[in-house]
Image (spheres, grey):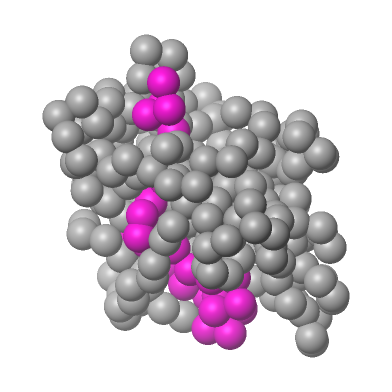
């Protein structure tokens, strides 16, 4: 298992700039992460055409939650907004480090796919991947209500081959980009928007995408795969 770190709309819209990521890696260490508790607190977001629906995740023995990928690239998010996480994962998390320990199990021969793979509308070469995500509810922030870890992410095929990893990203403007691809430190306005969002997180978790897009969905073809979230924490 490895560790990947940076520091300590219902529509699948065609926003290209929001969606290019790279990977950095390090060694897994430190205290054992706390398991995710309560599958009912974590929702799987799935596209059906241009609409999304949410279902409960599946509990894992000993803690953690999971879901099955579909053979269509429609699994978009694994997220929580449960009030029991207020002040733990939600609310003011500015300057803290989000950490997600994740893994995939899969049938032999499984290949991962993503939304509009091979389509000219999605020309970027990045394979299907997963990254950290959070949002706030503040219409005044516009597209900067929504933030993705960038560059920290991992291709799903790499996640499968490594046996698991921990994504670690500090809630600091330079490590996140918004829904139109602007980094939180790109200018004063975006920095202020990031600070406002990270100071009042209303939903957090992981998103799945590929090519140019971070959160328009991923799947498997052929075979089958199970995504596992073993822990998700926010720490000083």
Percent of width and height locating residue 10: 66, 29
Looking at the rendering, which quadrant does residue 200 occupy?
A: top left
- Furthest toward the front, the residue is 120
Does the magenta run of residues contain 234? Answer: no
Q: Is residue 182 placed above or below 207 in the rendered structure? A: above
Percent of width and height locating residue 48: 82, 39
Q: Which residues are magenta?
A: 142-168
How many numbered marks appear? 0
Between 175 and 229, the residue placed more toward the observer is 175
Between 145 and 228, the residue placed more toward the observer is 145
Between 127 and 105, the residue placed more toward the observer is 127
Percent of width and height locating residue 227: 67, 63
Q: Horizontally, is 109 left or right of 231 in the view?
A: right
Q: Is residue 16 placed above or below 164 in the rendered structure? A: above
Percent of width and height locating residue 197: 33, 27
Q: Residue at x 20, y 26 (%)?
A: 189
Q: Is residue 211 placed above or below 93 in the rendered structure? A: below
Q: Residue at x 57, y 61 (%)?
A: 123
**Residue 226 visible here:** no
Q: Residue at x 44, y 57 (%)?
A: 20
**Residue 204 visible here:** yes
Looking at the rendering, which quadrant does residue 62 occupy?
A: bottom right
Q: Residue at x 81, y 39 (%)?
A: 49
């Amino acid at each position: 298992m490895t560790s990947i770190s940076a520091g300590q709309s219902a529509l699948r819209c065609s926003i290209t700039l929001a969606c290019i990521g790279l990977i950095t890696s390090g060694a897994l260490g430190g205290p054992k992460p706390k398991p995710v508790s309560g599958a009912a607190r974590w929702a799987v977001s799935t596209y059906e055409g241009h609409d999304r629906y949410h279902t409960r995740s599946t509990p894992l023995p000993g803690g953690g939650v999971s879901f099955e990928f579909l053979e269509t690239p429609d699994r978009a998010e694994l997220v929580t907004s449960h009030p029991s996480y207020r002040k733990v994962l939600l609310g003011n998390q500015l300057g803290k480090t989000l950490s997600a320990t994740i893994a995939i199990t899969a049938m032999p021969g499984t290949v991962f796919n993503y939304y509009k793979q091979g389509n000219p509308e999605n020309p970027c070469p990045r394979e299907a991947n997963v990254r950290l995500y959070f949002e706030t509810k503040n219409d005044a922030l516009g597209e900067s209500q929504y933030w993705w870890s960038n560059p920290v992410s991992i291709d799903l095929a790499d996640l499968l081959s490594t046996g698991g990893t921990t994504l670690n990203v500090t809630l600091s403007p330079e490590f996140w980009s918004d829904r139109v691809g602007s980094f939180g430190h790109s200018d004063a306005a975006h920095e202020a928007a990031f600070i406002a969002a990270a100071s009042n997180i209303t939903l957090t978790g992981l998103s799945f995408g590929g090519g140019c897009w971070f959160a328009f969905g991923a799947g498997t073809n052929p075979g089958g795969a199970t995504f596992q979230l073993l822990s998700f924490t926010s720490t000083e």
